[in-house]
């Protein structure tokens, strides 16, 4: 057998999958691992795709995506986040996942270091390593899940190519204040680094407005935003994401993207166009439900004795379960076995997530109530 790429064989199946697959074996299982909205895609969005198909919009599009969608994505960012891009600065991809991969392939050469805040979305480490990069974790577990500039500065070396941030965050639900964003932008502006900002959860925010790094003019020339409609419009299966970055970067990202995908699925692009124009306020409908669920789960966790930050965004909450004396992986395994309930162990999001579990509140309030009852009973049994 010829040798496979060791960077590929070294990858592992994320912890999220391990637990979400196993819980399905139980008829009475409660699955709180889910990283997708539990709402249907809006009807007008579905109809836009059906109309596109009926109108034979089924061939390739321009590699960067249909012009109308690129324009809509640019206008969405201008209206919602005061971040200004032209349609030529947008590349439509197959989900934010492909956007991330295309960006990393565009900027990384072997040995380049990428700083990511941790606990972190697991695909970052995999994609950085697949592309020859080296992961440097910026531990945010002791700074309310928000990056600390001194700690960031201590990680920067001559080999650092980029800082990759994800706010609102998966898995912690933390979001950044305007001051946080400004401080980070000011720091990045003094360094020879790219900033990749994965803002896929930007529409899922509760008390405070989302502040986009795209609105920071002092780092515009080196910032690449990652976004898409998966989370904002409950469109995870449609596979539409995009990058926003200045022309000198987007032209290069486009070349990588067109060689691996040619273009994003065209009926899905028409659906995304409807999402970002006529259905642009749909996230508010979901947020009303998420907010109630977040507060419910938060209160229940506090009553159980967990230390937990109230998430400002996304649909995850990341309680500390170390008070139980159990390791997070053993905790999640025993919870699954004894109570037929799945959560994600924090160490799936790097060693900096150890001692925590991730609970998704993208489930009905009834499911969350049942889940919290089981969790509470499990914690009581331990003591
Ligand atoms: C932080 C983050 N970035 C990117 C993605 C991938 O999004 P998409 O479904 O658009 O590929 C996810 C999905 O869970 C995510 O949590």
Image: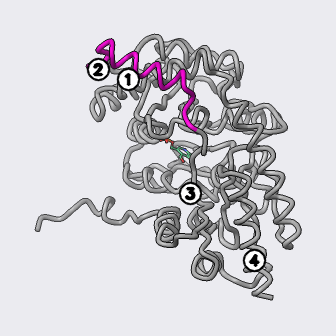
Quadrant of the frame with the N terminus:
bottom left
Determine contact: label 1, label 2, CB under 8 Å: yes
Of discs 4 and 2, which sits in the foreground?
A: 2
Q: Is residue 129 above or below residue 211?
A: below
**Which of pointers 1 and 2 lies earlier in the amino acid sequence?**
2
Q: Which mark is residue 88?
A: none
Task: Read off the residue under disc 4.
Answer: 322
| Pick the front one: 126 or 47 | 47
Find residue 297 and report its horizontal and vertical position in percent.
Answer: 79, 58
Between the residue at mark 3 and the residue at mark 1, the CA separation in whole angstroms equals 39 Å
Residue 187, horizontal then vertical, whole percent: 71, 38
Quarter where residue 172 is shown: bottom right
Q: Residue at x 72, y 56 (%)?
A: 366
- What stretch of residues is rendered in magenta? 40-60
Q: Earlier in the sequence, mark 2 or mark 3?
A: 2
Q: Give the mark, 1 or 4, whose residue is nearer the N terminus.
A: 1
Mark toward the start of the polypeptide (4 vs 2): 2
Element under disc 3: strand
**Residue, disc 2:** 58
Q: Which mark is residue 136?
A: 3
Residue linked to disc 1: 267
Compared across the picture, whether 25 is left or right of 208 comes to: left
Q: What residue is drawn where x is 36% and y is 66%?
A: 10
Q: Is residue 79 left or right of residue 31?
A: right
Observer-nearest residue: 365 or 269? Answer: 365
Could you say which is closer to the camera, residue 141 or residue 189? 141
Residue 82 in the image: state x and y as whole percent. 71, 18
Residue 101 vs residue 56, the one in the foreground:
56
């Amino acid at each position: 057998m010829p040798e496979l790429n060791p960077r590929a064989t070294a990858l592992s199946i994320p912890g999220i999958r391990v637990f979400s697959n196993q819980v399905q074996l139980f008829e009475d299982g409660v699955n709180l691992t889910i990283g997708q909205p539990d709402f249907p895609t809006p009807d007008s969005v579905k109809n836009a795709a059906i109309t596109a198909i009926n109108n034979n919009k089924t061939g390739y599009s321009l590699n960067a995506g249909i012009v109308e969608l690129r324009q809509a994505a640019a206008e969405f960012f201008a209206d919602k986040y005061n971040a200004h891009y032209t349609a030529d600065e947008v590349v439509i991809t197959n989900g934010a996942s492909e956007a991330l991969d295309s960006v990393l392939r565009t900027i990384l050469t072997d040995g380049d270091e990428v700083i990511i805040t941790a606990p972190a979305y697991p695909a970052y480490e995999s994609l950085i390593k697949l592309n020859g990069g080296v992961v440097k974790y910026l531990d945010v577990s002791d700074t309310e899940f928000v990056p600390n500039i001194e700690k960031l500065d201590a990680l920067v070396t001559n080999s650092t190519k980029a800082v990759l941030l994800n706010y609102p965050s998966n898995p912690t639900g933390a979001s950044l204040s305007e001051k946080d964003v400004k401080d980070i932008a000011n720091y990045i502006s003094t360094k020879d680094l790219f900033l990749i900002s994965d803002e896929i959860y930007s529409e899922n925010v509760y008390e405070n407005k989302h502040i986009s790094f795209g609105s920071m003019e002092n780092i515009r020339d080196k910032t690449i935003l990652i976004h898409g409609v998966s989370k904002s419009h409950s469109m995870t299966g449609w596979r539409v994401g995009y990058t926003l970055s200045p022309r000198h970067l987007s032209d290069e990202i486009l070349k990588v993207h067109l060689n691996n995908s040619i273009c994003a699925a065209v009926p899905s692009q028409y659906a995304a166009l409807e999402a970002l124009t006529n259905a642009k306020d749909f996230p508010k409908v979901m947020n009303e439900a998420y907010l109630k669920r977040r507060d419910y789960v938060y209160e229940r966790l506090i009553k159980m004795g967990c230390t937990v930050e109230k998430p400002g965004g996304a649909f995850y909450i990341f309680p500390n379960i170390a008070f139980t004396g159990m390791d997070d992986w053993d905790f999640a395994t025993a919870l699954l076995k004894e109570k037929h309930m799945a959560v994600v162990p924090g160490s799936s999001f790097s060693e900096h997530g150890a001692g925590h579990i991730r609970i998704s509140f993208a489930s009905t309030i009834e499911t969350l109530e049942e889940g919290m009852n089981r969790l509470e009973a499990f914690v009581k049994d331990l003591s």
